[in-house]
């Protein structure tokens, strides 16, 4: 059984994962209309992964005697100044998600909820991977700079960077 404190904290994370999915979906659309099919495909996959993260939390909350809340979401950014700016946002967002997961882990220990603590370890591991992937992408984008040919190759290769969860 979840305490009210844990239920509220998990529901907050459900909203964050849902917003992450929307943020990456908006990035996918922007990349697609800009003609970068590889980047768009990568962002569609990221968006789907975030939805899966959300659903995993939804099921956990409901199975543990709580009630998962499906709430209104903040509208994401739909345009970006550059691909570099877009991937900087992605990286910043993943760092934000990691800190939110860390806070959840902290609350689960305070509440002595070891089942939730155990459940959250999957998210801790996932965030390490996602931050690393976002950092790798940023490094590559920084190397490319404004080179159009580099961006073309990057668009071709980015799908291989997808880390499955
Ligand atoms: Fe990439 O954020 Fe979910 O966990």
Image (cartoon, rainbow, N blue to C red):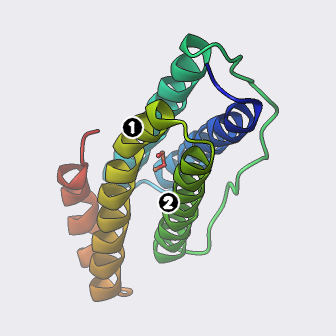
Which residue occupies the foreground of this view, 66 or 153? 66
Q: Tell me what residue is drawn at x 49 percent, y 34 percent.
A: 116
Which residue occupies the foreground of this view, 148 or 108? 108
**Disc 2 secondary structure class:** helix
Q: Is residue 147 visible?
A: no
Q: Is residue 50 visible?
A: yes
Query: What is the residue that sits farthest to the front in this orientation?
Result: 112
Q: Residues within 10 Å of mark 2 (few under 14, many from 20)?
A: many
N-term mark: 2 or 1: 2
Q: Are marks 2 and 1 in contact (CB under 8 Å)?
A: no
Could you say where residue 76 lies in the image, as x and y percent from the top left?
71, 51
Q: Tell me what residue is drawn at x 68 percent, y 18 percent.
A: 66
Q: Which mark is residue 80?
A: none
Q: Tell me what residue is drawn at x 34 percent, y 49 percent.
A: 126
Which residue occupies the foreground of this view, 52 or 69? 69
Count of all numbered marks drawn on residues in the image: 2
Q: Residues within 10 Å of mark 1 (few under 14, many from 20)?
A: few
Q: Is residue 89 above or below residue 26?
A: below
Could you say where residue 101 lies in the image, as x and y percent from the top left?
53, 53
In the picture of the structure, the residue carrying the numbered disc 2 is 98
Q: Tell me what residue is drawn at x 21 percent, y 57 percent.
A: 156
Is ligand 1 closer than 8 angstroms to the Cβ of mark 2? no
Q: Is residue 154 left or right of residue 64?
A: left
**Disc 1 secondary structure class:** helix
Q: Is residue 15 left or right of residue 27?
A: right
Could you say where residue 12 lies in the image, as x and y percent from the top left?
71, 41
Tell me the quadrant of the picture where the N terminus can be found.
top right
In the picture of the structure, the residue carrying the numbered disc 1 is 118
Q: Is residue 28 left or right of residue 154?
A: right
> Alpha carbon of mark 2 to alpha carbon of mark 1: how far?
16 Å
Q: Is residue 160 above or below residue 90?
A: above
């Amino acid at each position: 059984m979840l305490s009210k404190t844990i239920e509220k904290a998990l529901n907050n994370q459900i909203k964050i994962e849902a917003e992450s999915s929307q943020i990456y979906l908006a990035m996918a659309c922007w990349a697609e209309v800009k003609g970068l099919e590889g980047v768009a495909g990568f962002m569609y996959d990221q968006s789907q992964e975030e939805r899966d993260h959300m659903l995993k939390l939804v099921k956990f909350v409901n199975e543990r005697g709580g009630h998962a809340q499906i709430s209104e979401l903040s509208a994401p950014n739909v345009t970006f100044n550059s691909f570099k700016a877009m991937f900087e946002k992605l990286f910043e967002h993943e760092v934000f998600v990691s800190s939110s997961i860390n806070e959840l882990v902290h609350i689960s220990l305070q509440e002595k909820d070891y089942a939730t603590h155990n459940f959250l370890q999957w998210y801790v591991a996932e965030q390490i991977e996602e931050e690393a992937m976002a950092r790798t992408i940023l490094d590559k984008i920084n190397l490319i700079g404004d080179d159009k040919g580099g961006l073309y190759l990057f668009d071709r290769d980015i799908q291989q960077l997808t880390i499955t969860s």
